[in-house]
């Protein structure tokens, strides 16, 4: 195994991790809620009157951030090594997984682990293990 040094970005990855941790800590501090994306977006499917504004604001912020990046850094061309069918299937599987796992990687992996939640540790290990196994099967056994 070799490291792709042209795409190895430890400093930007560290900065992103710090921003995620800071955002999660501030969100729980000011809202008393865990910053789990699937829970926030899922709450819009059956919204309570007092929850709509902050959930929509959060979602709009998530959509605005990449647009702001394009304005500042210029356009980029994403590369996805899969067809639309595979991307849709992967999205559906992630959605089903977040329902069965009672949360997503941000809720369990970032917020749950920082609160030392055993349930979040098991969920995060399951997410990561399944991801590792999937990549191995697709790249090495099916290739």
Image (spheres, rainbow, N blue to C red):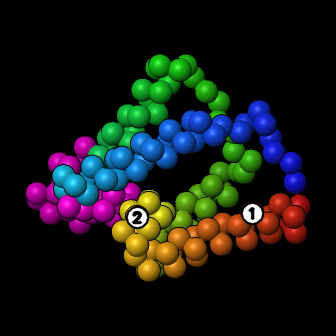
Q: Which residue is mark 2?
A: 114
Distance between mark 1 and mark 2 Cα atoms: 27 Å
Can residue 71 be found in the magenta stretch?
Answer: no
Q: Residue at x 87, y 54 (%)?
A: 1
Residues tagged 1 and 2 counted as in contact (Cβ below 8 A): no
> Residue 135, which numbered label?
1
Which of disc 2 and disc 1 is earlier in sequence?
A: 2
Q: Residue at x 46, y 20 (%)?
A: 71
Q: Residue at x 80, y 69 (%)?
A: 137
**Is residue 16 positioned above or below 27 on the image?**
above
Tell me if 82 is positioned left or right of 125 in this view: right
- Residue 136 position, x and y percent, is 79, 66
The boundaries of the magenta stretch are 32-57
Tell me if 54 is positioned left or right of 74 in this view: left
| Of residues 72 and 6, the one drawn nearer to the viewer in this rendering | 6
- Residue 73 position, x and y percent, is 53, 20
- How many neighbours does mark 1 have within 10 angstroms: few (below 14), some (14-19), or many (20 or more)? few
**Which quarter of the picture shows residue 8?**
top right
**Is residue 64 positioned above or below 57 on the image?**
above
- Residue 120 position, x and y percent, is 45, 74
Q: Residue at x 57, y 36 (%)?
A: 12
């Amino acid at each position: 195994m070799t490291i792709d040094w042209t795409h190895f970005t430890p400093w930007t990855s560290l900065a992103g991790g710090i921003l995620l941790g800071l955002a999660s800590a501030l969100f729980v501090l000011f809202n008393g809620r865990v910053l789990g994306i699937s829970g926030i977006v899922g709450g819009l499917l059956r919204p309570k009157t007092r929850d709509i504004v902050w959930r929509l604001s959060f979602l709009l912020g998530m959509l605005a951030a990449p647009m702001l990046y394009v304005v500042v850094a210029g356009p980029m061309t994403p590369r996805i090594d899969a067809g639309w069918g595979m991307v849709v299937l992967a999205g559906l599987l992630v959605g089903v997984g977040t329902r069965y796992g009672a949360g997503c990687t941000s809720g369990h992996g970032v917020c749950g682990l920082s609160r030392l939640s055993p349930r979040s540790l098991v969920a995060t290990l399951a997410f990561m293990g399944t991801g590792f196994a999937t990549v191995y099967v697709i790249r090495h056994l099916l290739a």
